[in-house]
Image (cartoon, rainbow, N blue to C red):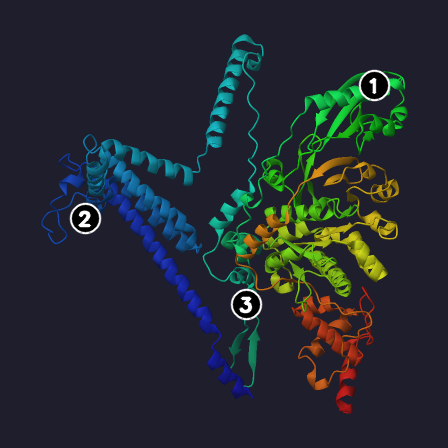
Amino acid sequence: MAKTVKKESKEKDPQSDIKILKTKKQYRMLFGFLLILLSIAFLVSFISYFVPGESGIASGLADQSVTIGDRSQPANNWFGIIGSEIAKLFIYQGFGIASFLFVKLLFLSGSFLVLDLPIKKLKNTWFWDLFAIIVLSIFFGFFSATLPGLGGAIGFEMNDFLGDYIGQTGTFLGIIFAIVIYLIFKIKISPDAIKTFFEKKHKDIKDNLNELIVAENGADYNLEEFAVKEDEELEQPTLKPSQFEINKEALKPTIENASEINLEPTIKTPEPEPEIITTNDEAFVIEQAADEDVIEENLAAKLVADFGEFDPTLELSNYKFPTIDLLKEYTSVGITINQEELEENKNRIVETLKNYKIDIAQIKATVGPSVTLYEIVPEAGIRISKIKSLEDDIALSLAALGIRIIAPIPGKGTIGIEVPNKNPTMVPMKTVISSAKFQEAEMELPIALGKTISNETFVVDLAKMPHLLMAGATGQGKSVGLNAVLTSLLYKKHPAEVKFVLVDPKKVELTLFNKIERHYLAKLPDDSDAIITDNTKVILTLNSLCIEMDNRYSLLKDAMVRNIKEYNDKFKARKLNPENGHRFLPYIILVVDEFADLIMTAGKEVETPIARLAQLARAIGIHLIIATQRPSVNVITGIIKANFPARIAFRVTSKIDSRTILDTQGADQLIGRGDLLYSNGNDLVRVQCAFVDTPEVEKIVDYIGSQKAYASAYLLPEYVGEEGSSVNLEFDISERDSLFREAAEIIVTAQQGSASLLQRKLKLGYNRAGRLIDQLEAAGVVGPFEGSKARSVNIPDLASLDQFFTNEQNND
């Protein structure tokens, strides 16, 4: 046995790698010292070239006739004949005085080799110094008539060449442009830096003058009393979405397979092998454990420095967002003010209130797309409730449908009367998408709903709602509102950042979005169609989203963060290892077009997972948008309302329906055709919903669908129903997974039977982890499925598990 060990140690020779490494370091250090000494030799040769010799002539000029093969003529250069040839080659025949930068480059390169620093960090220095050498040579060559020799032969010839084509003026301008390039990209000079420099100098001068006055007069005079107050510090500019695209393109690595980028930082440091020490006794071998490698700098920071932050959009780096010209441009847009109509309505409002002995101190009209707001200030002593009760009388006098009184207007000391316009104007989707308020919105999930009464684009953040409930009677604009929501997100979010789960019981409203399945949609693994139209599949999808929610919370727990934004920021900074199951998490938005139909057919099976998601899913980026045309209490239950603070109400037929949606009346007074009230738990905002027609949506999805996509839609976790009817628990022992025993040990050790645990520990996909759980259930290691709870574990410890496997083998 001793001979075998000795033979293996000879064949392996573990010390050979260490010897090779030491030899490489020795050669590296030797070459580094050579470069340092060479830089000193160059420096001595170059300086000596300009120093006058015994004859009073500079050694460079005196040595012009000296050659390497002729030892009879002594050189004046301090480094002898070799030095004179080096100086002649680099200064006289080369780049002139700019050649001194070669000394710097040689010295830095040698120092990096001696100190064992990464030489690739010098690439930037070499590039810009060589650039500077060429520019300085041409610059001094330009003044060769007054400063001969400083630009060298290259500088002179380059000026002569450029002068023939662009003249002296063009040559000088080109030199100035090259210097500006160096200052901007190398020295990093910017307008802000220049302004800060002069402001600092100005401040220093004033401080010195203050001190001088104090020294001479013995009193402290403040010059600020006689000078203009300095400007405040300039704020940091905010990058627009278009600028991010440019940055992403500029930082895109030049490799074809984007997955290689994600795998690079996950390579682990190899564990050091022990050192084998042989003795005189062949039967006795000493094994000395090697010291662990020491990482001197933070690994995540090093990975970011080497590869940059992880870019989730890299796989579809050439993806182009839809252009605004895909949306239809309507000719009859914009608010038209009919002064006669406004005067007539004002007079009728004043006259009606006067009939009830209510005097008006002031009245103001604000014209919106479909509604005009009349703000009135009643005389002192008038009760607000009295005006509120006259809503029907004012509507009768104006002969208008949809009069709504706001008494008082929040934040103002006025009472508002909303009166529909006789000729309402449409709000095209193009106008709200192209608005600065939407384009510059710094939100996670921005949605442009339409325009308010004051004609401002109304933009909200779905991530802060965090869920949205939409309701309204048939034909009042719910489907158009859903299309406006989806269109807004398609114009702002990359396919890597957001995924949609679309539920369409009507089977016709959301089918257009099938074309962007592999870009933006999420679905169950075995589903052929990403748009869910079958109510039984809705139940599976909702429960699958609950599993996704639990898995994401496990990832957040391991990463020690509180929400999806912190998690993704940490993942982008390469502080989370993909080998431990971590991944970039896109937002998932569940859209249900007709919720009442699901409640009628599925009831609690739908309401329970919806309530779970609404209560818990906001932190991990799963948001719900639910629409229904029947806002009754058995559809919009107390649990649903409690977890959907953000609500949109289109026109409904009764005050009861309005109270069901908004907890107040007002939705029954809307005029329809996209007129809506938005509430996020505080005040109501009246908005004219943006109109996006089916052909416009079709153009957008065609534009996206024609581009390169992912291999498949985003796959949700597989869900098995509580009855387990789709699972065959009769497993043959020979057909067990190769990781069956290891999975059993993990489950027994943790005393927790869940597929997500196996995913993290064994680094498996969800499907394989689910099959392992089914096999463990069939073997009796874990108990049956218990909904959202983890399965019970029937074996208490590892010793009992070993006994279990022994009994199985004996029975076979």
Q: Which mark is residue 85?
A: 2
Coordinates of residue 516 in the picture (x, y in percent): 60, 57
Vertical arrangement, residue 505 with respect to residue 809, above or below: above
Q: Give 172 or 545, whichever is nearer the viewer.
A: 545
Coordinates of residue 217 in the picture (x, y in percent): 54, 8
Q: Which tag, 1 or 2, sits closer to the chain's start?
A: 2
Vertical arrangement, residue 374 with respect to residue 361, above or below: below
Q: Which tag, 2 or 3, sits closer to the chain's start?
A: 2
CA neighbours of label 1 inside 10 A, class few (<14), some (14 to 19), many (20+): some
Quadrant (top left/top right/bottom left/bottom right) for the C terminus:
bottom right
Q: Nearer the viewer, mark 1 or mark 3?
A: 1
Residue 310 visible within the image: no
Amino acid type assigned to the residue bearing label 2 in the image: Glu
Q: Nearer the viewer, mark 1 or mark 2?
A: 1
Quadrant (top left/top right/bottom left/bottom right) for the N terminus:
bottom right
CA neighbours of label 2 inside 10 A, class few (<14), some (14 to 19), many (20+): many
Q: Which mark is residue 351?
A: 1
Amino acid type assigned to the residue bearing label 3 in the image: Pro
Task: Name the residue: 30% across, 33% down.
Answer: 173
Secondary structure at badge 2 equals helix
Amino acid type assigned to the residue bearing label 1 in the image: Glu
Secondary structure at badge 3 equals loop
Q: CA distance from mark 2 to mark 3?
A: 50 Å
Vertical arrangement, residue 240 with respect to residue 222, above or below: below
Q: Which residue is mark 3?
A: 270
